[in-house]
Structure formats: structure tokens, C-alpha cells
Amino acid sequence: MKTEDFDLFQSVLKQRSGLVLTRDKAYLLESRLTPVARRWNMKDLGELAGAIRSRRDERLLRDVTEAMTTNESSFFRDGKPFELFRQVVLPTFLKAREDTRRIRIWSAACSTGQEPYSLAMILHEEQAKLAGWSVEIVGTDLSTEVLDRARAGVYSQFEVQRGLPITHLVKYFRQQGDRWEIIPEIRRMVTYREFNLLNDLGTLGTFDVVFCRNVLIYFDQPTKTRVLEAIGRIMPPDGVLVLGGAETVLGITDRFKPMDNHRGLYQLTTAPRPQGLAVKAAG
Amino acid sequence: MKTCLVVDDSRVVRKVARKILEELSFACDEAEDGRQAMEACVRRMPDLILLDWNMPVMNGIEFLRSLRQMEGGDVPRVVFCTTENDLAHIQEALSAGANEYIMKPFDSDIVQSKLAQIGLV
Ligand SMILES: C[S@@+](CC[C@H](N)C(=O)[O-])C[C@H]1O[C@@H](n2cnc3c(N)ncnc32)[C@H](O)[C@@H]1O
């Protein structure tokens, strides 16, 4: 691949999705963008780069960006954060929101839906405690392709065997040949929406619980800082942030601090906001 | 070390399963059908039984029902591992006392995930 073509893809991706692509990952461009070039009747990445340069076609740019995302996910991924959600986070908010009886949960890079549906299944298991409550789960992602799959809620035999207890498969899925469809009752609990984490989060409203897992790893440090601080601004002072196993706030922002004894969970600090406003958050 | 009994009439499947389980630090024993598996359990109850459904002599579900009636037969965690991959079979297995269920084809990711569900890894 020509250096100038690599540089073009690199800057397009950085700008549109935050993805940081180092030169040793050039092979990823080849393997993931060659099918895009084919779909657009182009012979190779050189021609694709040329097309991007000559006409900034929005659909083409979107195809390129989506093709470069990693959409790997699984139900109850890593187990522990979901256990903590059920045992610690949910009971905390059941107390703290007794007056409004309203909880909003955001799965911020939900990919094909396993993360928000795992949360929905937990809420369903705890439904006795939630009578009269309004609990909203919003799943967002940059990629429309994964959102279509999330909305459909249909998974392969392989996908339903990773992380999902067999009792949940029996209870929450219907079989269609060798595919498994999540039941409407669970599907209805999640609202999906296309959303780029680099955009203004103000349009989303506020969230008590934010699952932002396995997406920050693809960003550079300033982008991580920017996104985490933006998330902090749409959370109430007692909100809880859940990150992926390889992610942390340490050295990235002081708006959040790890929760004691609850690995992967973070809370807002009372530290001064980056703008220098010495706001003392409650709690 | 945790012990596992792999019950399958296919030597290939037993070999693949054994390799995966040994990598997860299980000491493995093998049986070719339900009757051999019963004999093994009479000698010593394993911690885990990976169980095929369709086998000559005594099939998986018959074995499981007898196992759960034996003294100490409630101890082993039983994970079906079978090409019977429809809801009716899964439900039958669960009501006979299976703890987890793997639909073939399987790989080490699936085995590991299923064993994590029942607290064995
Ligand atoms: C590896 S998946 C993580 C899925 C799930 N959160 C989990 O932990 O299993 C990463 C997802 O982030 C999405 N993504 C990447 N950059 C994004 C951005 N700038 N805004 C929103 N979503 C993004 C990708 O489309 C992909 O679906």
C-alpha cells in the first residue's frame, strides 16, 4: 500500500470513529477494506483511496469506517461486571431512586446487542423488585450494520453458547432452525440508536449507569479523555460507569475513580472539573 | 485436581474434548457409552461429566437419570455435549438434572464458557 493511501485511511478513520491505526496494522486495512472496494466495483485499495480523495462520498466514507470497526461481543462478557450490576449497582439505584422510580442505562458501544440484552435479562430476573419502575436501556453504536443485527436479536448457535447460561437460552430465546431469536419481551426493553461517541453527547439525556466497554481501547489518549469526560457530564453525581477489562480511567481523567472492591466499576470524583470550575459534587 | 469423565461413542470427540479439558486442568477419564460411564461412576464420582446423547447400550439421558438416583450421584456436574440441538431435548436434559448443555460443534471457548457458568473454571 502506498504511504499516502495509508495516511489517508488513517486520518479518515481517526476523524470519523476515533480509531487509531498504526502502521503495523496496515494488513487490517487490506483484509477489511478489500471487500468494501469490491462492493463499490473498485479493483483495490489504491482505487478506493483515490475515490475518497476525489469525491468525499458520505456513503463510501461510512462503509469504510464501519468495515474497520471490531464488533466482537458476547452475552455477559467477562461475567463479573454483570454480576456486580445485579448485586451492587441495581440495589444501589433501587434505593437512591426510590422517589422517581426511574433508571436509565446506556450501552455506549453495544455492537450486535449482547451487552444491552444481558442487562435486560438481569432486569427481567429481578422484575419482582422493579414493579412500578421505569427502567430504560439504550444501546448505541456507530455502525448501522451491527445495530440492524441488534434490533433483529437473532444469534447463531455459536454466539448463544458463549457467556449465556443454558437456562437463559431456554427462557429468553426462541429457536429458528440453527438460529436463536431473543423473545419480544426482552427485545422491547432495549432501544437502539445510531450514535458516534465523538459527537455531542448532550442529545442523549442523562444516564445513571453507563456501560462503555471495549471501545475506548481503540482510541488515542486525548480521545479517551475527551469521551470519558463527556460521559461524566451526562451522569448524575452518583452515576456508575462500567469499563472493559483492559480499560481504566487512571492516567486518563480524574473525573472518575475506581470503586473500592468492585473491579471495572467507576464513580464520579469530586475533583475540580477540567474547566477549572470547582464544583463539589454530592456523595 | 478436578476430575472429568468424557462419555461419547466417538473416539475423535473424546480425544478433542479430553485435550480441551486437560488444558483446563482436569484429569480425564473416558467412557464409550452410558453403561461404561455408570461403571466408572460406581468406582468413583467425577467432578464433571461431559455427556453425549446418542450412544449404543445406554444413551446419555438414560445414564443421567440413573446417575441422579445413585448414592452420591447428585455430586457430579453434568454437561451434555450433543448434536441434539433443539429446545425440546435441552428442556428434557435440564429436567433430568443436567447442569449445562453444549450443542455440537463445540470448541474450547464454548467449553470454557459453559464450565464457567457452573463454577468449574
Ligand atoms: C468490540 S465492540 C464492543 C461491544 C460491547 N460493548 C462489548 O464489550 O462486548 C466495539 C464497538 O464499538 C463501536 N465503535 C467504534 N468506534 C465508535 C465510535 N466512535 N462511536 C460509537 N461506537 C463506536 C464499533 O462499531 C463496535 O461495535
Image (cartoon, helix red, strand yellow):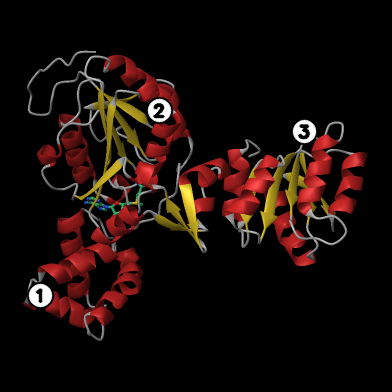
Determine if marks 1 and 3 fall on one subunit.
no
- Give the image location of residue A107, x and y in percent: 29, 41
Q: Which mark is residue B75?
A: 3
Check the residue under mark 3 and report the chain it is in: B
Q: Could you tell me the amino acid type at mark 2?
A: Gln
Q: Nearer the viewer, mark 2 or mark 1?
A: 2
Q: Are marks 2 and 3 in contact (CB under 8 Å)?
A: no
Return the disc, 2 or 1, that comes first in the chain's sequence.
1
Q: CA distance from mark 2 to mark 3?
A: 32 Å
**Pointer 1: what residue?**
A53
Task: Check the image and report above or below for B9 versus B113.
Answer: below
Q: CA distance from mark 2 to mark 1?
A: 53 Å
Residue A32 placement: quadrant: bottom left
Q: Could you tell me the amino acid type at mark 1?
A: Arg
In the displayed structure image, the side of residue A159 where residue A202 appears, left or right? left
Badge 2 crowding class, 10 Å Cα cut-off, few under 14, some 14 to 19, many 20 or more, is: few
Q: Secondary structure at mark 3?
A: loop
At horizontal 76% and vertical 50% (from top left) the residue drawn is B61
Check the residue under mark 2 and report the chain it is in: A
